[in-house]
Image (tube, grey):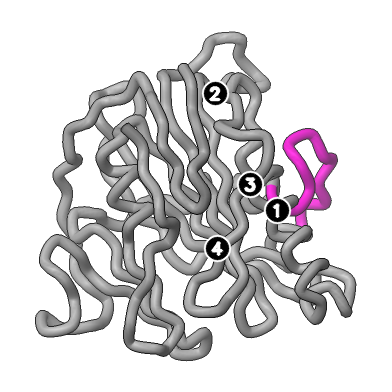
Amino acid sequence: MRRVWLLPTLVAAAMLSSAHAQISGPASSGGPATVPPGFQAWSNPELHLTWLYPAELTPVDGAFAITAAQRMLHGEDAELDPTQADTCAKVLLSVGNGTEGKGQWARVGLVAVNGQCFPAKVLQSKKATQMLLRNLVSQGTTVMGMMPVEDQPADYQIEGHWASFSAAQGEPVSKSDLQTGEQQLIGLAAVQVAGRILGWVLETNDAAMFNRLLGSGVDFGTGKPEPLFGGGVR
């Protein structure tokens, strides 16, 4: 499979289903007048964040999001202190549908990483922040058996906040089992805001849902949501 970056747009060729997943779930905030058809809204007043995500998604276990957060912070093969993930990363939202190995499935987690887990001055420097975000999304999408879609993550902004995006494709391999999983896509967008890093973890075998998640609206208080990442797969 071949993937080509058109910054900030990702154009891809993937051996994935193009059908839309069908799930349902209640909106946690927002109303019919402010939420586009087919989406629901989740808000966090402390972060001044509203995220508009596919209306079909329902709550799922957030273990996959914590696993991705651990990769972001420590790398895939790091020996982890079991208390570190609880101190540095917190799952704010975890939604999805379907079951791996049983047709179409998708899951997305929103993770907040405490800025105090990084050197004090990192988030005060544009250059250092961009480098940090690149490293986080690159490590977060480094999974045994999967290949990055491009050598370097994409740098961009969401409502003036620096962000980076990285994606990988392939068949993930469990460290405890030589058997591989099914062909899938993973993506990770990291945004610096309010002294924190927010990470959107996307995992699915459905290219159409991956596109919908990339196009989901993120609003940090301007009232004009921008896409999580301005690209898609085909």
Instruction: Find out whether residue 76 is within the magenta segment.
Output: yes
Q: Secondary structure at mark 4?
A: strand
**Amino acid under label 2?**
Pro
**Residue 38 figure quarter:** bottom left
Q: Secondary structure at mark 3?
A: loop
Which residue was labeled with disc 4?
111
Quick one: 174 or 144, which is closer to the camera?
Answer: 144
Which residue was labeled with disc 1?
134
Which residue was labeled with disc 2?
172
Q: Does label 4 or label 3 sit earlier along the sequence?
A: 4
Structural crowding at the residue carrying mark 2, measured as other residues with C-alpha within 10 Å and reported as few (<14), some (14–19) or many (≥20):
many
First to last magenta residue range? 72-83
Q: Is residue 155 left or right of residue 47?
A: right
Which residue was labeled with disc 3?
153
Quick one: 231 or 173, which is closer to the camera?
Answer: 231
Count of residue discs: 4
Tell me which residue sits at (65%, 19%) in the image: 176
Q: Does label 1 or label 4 sit earlier along the sequence?
A: 4
Q: Are marks 1 and 4 in contact (CB under 8 Å)?
A: no
Q: CA distance from mark 4 to mark 3?
A: 19 Å
Q: Secondary structure at mark 1?
A: helix
